[in-house]
Image (tube, rainbow, N blue to C red):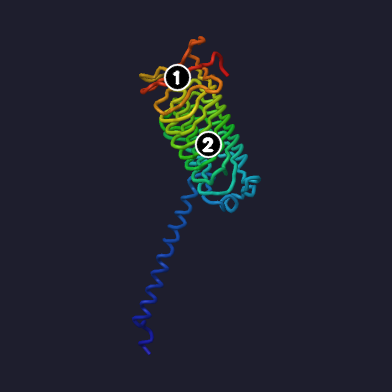
Amino acid sequence: MLKDLFFTKAQFAIVLTLSLTAIVAVPVGLVVWGNIYSHYSVGDIVIRSNNDFTLRYNFPGQGTELDPFRIENLTISSSKEYGIYISDTTKYFIINNCSISGVSRGIYIYNIADDTTKIENNTITLDGVTSYTGIEINSTNNVTIVNNKIQGNNNERTSYGLYVRYSDNFLTSKNNISSFNVGIYCNNFANLVITQNNVFYNTIGIQVHSITNILVVYNNIMFNLEYGIYSEGTTGTFHHNNFFNNLLIPKINQHKQASDQGGSSTWYDISTNHGNYWSDLSWTEEAVYVLDGYYNPKSDLYPLKYPV
C-alpha cells in the first residue's frame, strides 16, 4: 500500500536521531584525536604516563630502581618546544648521554614520583631568541642532575640553564652551565645541594629564592656579567666556592660578586672556619668579604687565600 512507503512519526524520529549521530560522530572523533595528538606533538619525546615508556617508545628497562627505563644515546635536533617532556609517572627512569638542540626547552620534568628521576651526561645546546630553558624540574622531589653540559647562546632575560621549583631534596653536581640569563635558578623548596658545577658567562650565575636548607659548595662561578650568586630569602650555607671575575658589566649598586638579600645564610663553613675564594679581595689574615645586600649585609668572615 502507498502508506507503507512513508515513515510513521516514530520511525522518522529514529532515523533522524541515527543520522545526526552519524554526522556528529566524525567531527567529535577528530576533536578527541586532535587533542590527544596535540598533547604529544609538543616535543620529540613526550611521556605522560607509565605506559608511554614502553607502548609509545619501547625504551629498555623495567622501570624499577635496579632496572630503570633508559632514555639514552639519543640525538634530538628539533624546532619543537621540548626535546624531552615527562610528566605524571611513577616508574624509575634515567636520561643519559643524549644530545639535544634547537628546541626551546631541552628537558622538562613535571609531577614525577619521588626519587625516580636521574639526568646524567647529556649535552643541551639552545639558541632561542626569546625564552628557553636547558633543564626544568617542577613539582618533583629527590631529583639528581649530574655531569651535563648546558649551553645557551646569549643572556636573554628569560633564559635559564637549570630551572628548579617546588622540588624538595634536589642535587645538582658537576654540570657545566653557560650563556644564559641565569645559569642555575631555584625557588620555593627545601633541601638543595649545588656542588662542583662550573657556572660561567651568564648574566647571573646562580640565583636562589625562598630555599630552606641550601648547601652550595665547591663550585667555580666565573665571568658572569652581574652577580656570581644572588640569594634572596634563603637559609643555608655557602663555602669553598671560587668566585672569579664576576660583575663584568655590573648594574648600579652592584659592587660585590655575590648578594644576599634576607634569609639566614652563612658564607663560611662553621666547623672549619673556611669560606670562599673571591678574586676581587686583597687577602690578609684579617680580611672579611662583605656581600651586597639591602638589609644587614652578610659577610664571609673567613675568605680563602687561594682557589680550591
* Left-right relation of 25 to 58: left
Image quarter where the N terminus lies is bottom left
Q: Position of residue 102 (x, y in %)?
A: 51, 36
1 or 2: mark nearer the eye: 1
The residue lying toward the viewer, choosing from 80 and 144, is: 144
* Left-right relation of 286 to 9: right
Q: Is residue 268 above or below residue 23?
A: above
Residue 308 position by quadrant: top right
Q: Amino acid at mark 1?
A: Ser
Which mark is drawn over residue 170? 2
Q: Position of residue 306 (x, y in %)?
A: 56, 14
**Residue 12 in view in this figure:** yes
Q: Position of residue 32 (x, y in %)?
A: 45, 58
Total marks in image? 2
The residue lying toward the viewer, choosing from 271 and 173, is: 271
Which mark is drawn over residue 299? 1
Determine the residue positioned at 49% across, 40% down: 167
**Residue 129 in view in this figure:** no
